[in-house]
Image: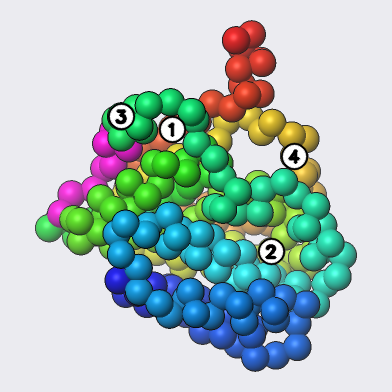
Amino acid sequence: MKINDLGEYYTRQIGAIVALAGRHSLWREEATAMLPRLTRSYKRSESDALLTTLSEAQCLDYIVQTGLGNDASFKAAVSAIPLSGWKDFTAPDVALKLHESLANKLYNAKPGVNDRVSMRFGDGSRIMGPMLVNKCLHDKVPFVIYFVNPDFHALLLNHASPEGVKALGQDFLRMTDGTNKSIIARSGMPNHKPVAAQRDKAQIYDTETAPHFRKASTGEMFYTLTAIPTQKDAEIDGI
């Protein structure tokens, strides 16, 4: 399977990164290095590698969408955050069968009924994520993936113009357009002090993306969710 096979959204995303690699930008080197991984084939046994590529592609694409390609202060801030994407995500140190059990409970798509799934993966989903991707591939269910990286997201909002924030929200709607199922596996409380998003920028983004989340609240979109406990959660709970 190639990333292009995942659908129009990813075809556009690849085009944006190819364009980024072809012009002057502070991220040109990263975009150029990614090109071979964007066009190669991935086996189901390589779902973790696929997710690494998709995560890094999302970051570069969002930098393009928000117009931050030549913002040196933004790039310096990104280099200082502890989690830069899927490659830094972890998973609880528990038996594999427990990860499999939770993945089975979260998976809510059915083959042959025109389901289209949006998945949101955060820190803690490193083992479950590939399992869920492979379930979609096995059932031939189309999917898109949003990587939950709160620090990177906050930096995008803080450094982008209001127009750039709107563009970011509109891109999220394009990505999730047509999805009727949602699977969310995100982290609990962060173990480090998170980057705070500017309230006015966060409100702009929330307004732009509200149509998607209203679908979940009204039942138009069926969703399953888990928050994966962190060390900070354990400390709060006195464990």
Element assignment for label 2: helix
Q: Is residue 177 above or below residue 151?
A: below
**Which residue is depicted at the point 49% across and 64% down?**
54
Callouts 3 and 1 close, C-beta under 8 Å:
no
Look at 42% across and 42% down and name the residue there.
127
Query: Pointer 4: residues within 10 angstroms few (<14), some, or many (20+)?
Result: some
Q: Gap in Å between the C-alphas at discs 3 and 4? A: 31 Å
Q: Quadrant of residue 219?
A: top left
| Residue occupied by mark 4 | 194
Which segment is the magenta one? Answer: 103-111
Q: Secondary structure at mark 4?
A: loop
Residue under numbered circle 2: 165
* Label 4 to label 2: alpha-carbon separation: 19 Å
Q: Amino acid at mark 1?
A: Thr
Q: CA distance from mark 2 to mark 3?
A: 40 Å
- Residue 8 in sight: no
* Disc 4 and disc 2 in contact, CB within 8 angstroms: no
